[in-house]
């Protein structure tokens, strides 16, 4: 990755971290789930409104590092109108991206997160919102933490 591209990616992450999109409560949500990363202190509460197995709206509340906030912000835009199965496929590719630097498909704006693979401890920050969203869509009970043996 060129220095210019790395700088651009970092500026996008900082922007989404400081000014997250789709941040706030969602009055008509029919799925909610909380996620917690005890290593970093990140807390995310995901709200999703679905209809006919498609995500119509995603919003989130919480606080955390720039990586967790940027990941939640980017995720909330990217996954609109997708089914749970499609979301699980995108998450698998996203997880591959942030652990190896490469993905099987073009993940659009999520490419900015590719540098996370250089900092393995930050993978949990980047995946927290995703695990919370999947738990919400699966109606899993209890809080999701990044220290769970089998995260969602």
Image: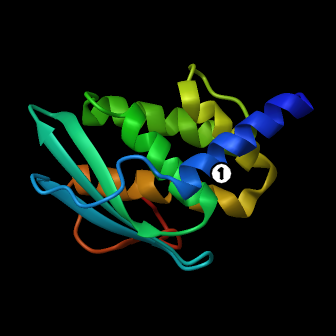
Residue identifier under label 1: 14
- Compared with 3, 121 (above or below) is below
Side of 144 relative to 126 (left or right): left
* Quadrant of the rendering where the C terminus is positioned: bottom left
Residue located 53% across and 49% down the image: 71
Of residue 134 and residue 69, the one placed in the foreground of this image is 69
Of residue 99 and residue 59, the one placed in the foreground of this image is 59
Of residue 108 and residue 25, the one placed in the foreground of this image is 25
Residue located 75% across and 35% down the image: 8
* Quadrant of residue 44 within the rendered picture: bottom left
Disc 1 packing (10 Å; few <14; some 14–19; many ≥20): some
* Quadrant of the rendering where the N terminus is positioned: top right
* Quadrant of residue 26 within the rendered picture: bottom left
Residue located 57% across and 20% down the image: 106
Q: Position of residue 105 (x, y in %)?
A: 56, 20
Residue located 51% across and 68% down the image: 146
Q: Position of residue 145 (x, y in %)?
A: 45, 72
Side of 7 relative to 16 (left or right): right
Side of 143 relative to 91 (left or right): left
Of residue 25 and residue 32, the one placed in the foreground of this image is 25
**Colour scheme of the picture:** rainbow
Q: Position of residue 43 (x, y in %)?
A: 44, 72
Q: Position of residue 100 (x, y in %)?
A: 73, 39
- Compared with 25, 142 (above or below) is below
Secondary element under disc 1, as helix, strand or loop, is helix
């Amino acid at each position: 990755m060129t220095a210019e591209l790395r700088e651009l990616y970092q500026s996008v992450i900082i922007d989404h971290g400081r000014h997250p999109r789709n941040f706030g409560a969602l009055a008509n949500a029919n799925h909610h789930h909380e996620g917690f990363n005890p290593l970093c202190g990140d807390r995310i509460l995901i709200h999703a409104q679905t209809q006919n197995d498609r995500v119509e709206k995603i919003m989130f509340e919480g606080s955390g590092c720039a990586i967790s906030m940027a990941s939640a912000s980017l995720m909330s835009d990217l996954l609109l109108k997708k089914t749970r199965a499609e979301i699980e496929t995108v998450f698998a590719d996203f997880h591959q991206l942030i652990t190896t630097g490469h993905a099987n498909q073009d993940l659009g704006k999520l490419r900015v997160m590719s540098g996370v693979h250089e900092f393995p401890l930050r993978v949990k920050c980047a995946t927290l919102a995703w695990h919370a969203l999947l738990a919400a869509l699966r109606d899993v009970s209890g809080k999701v933490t990044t220290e769970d043996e089998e995260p969602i």
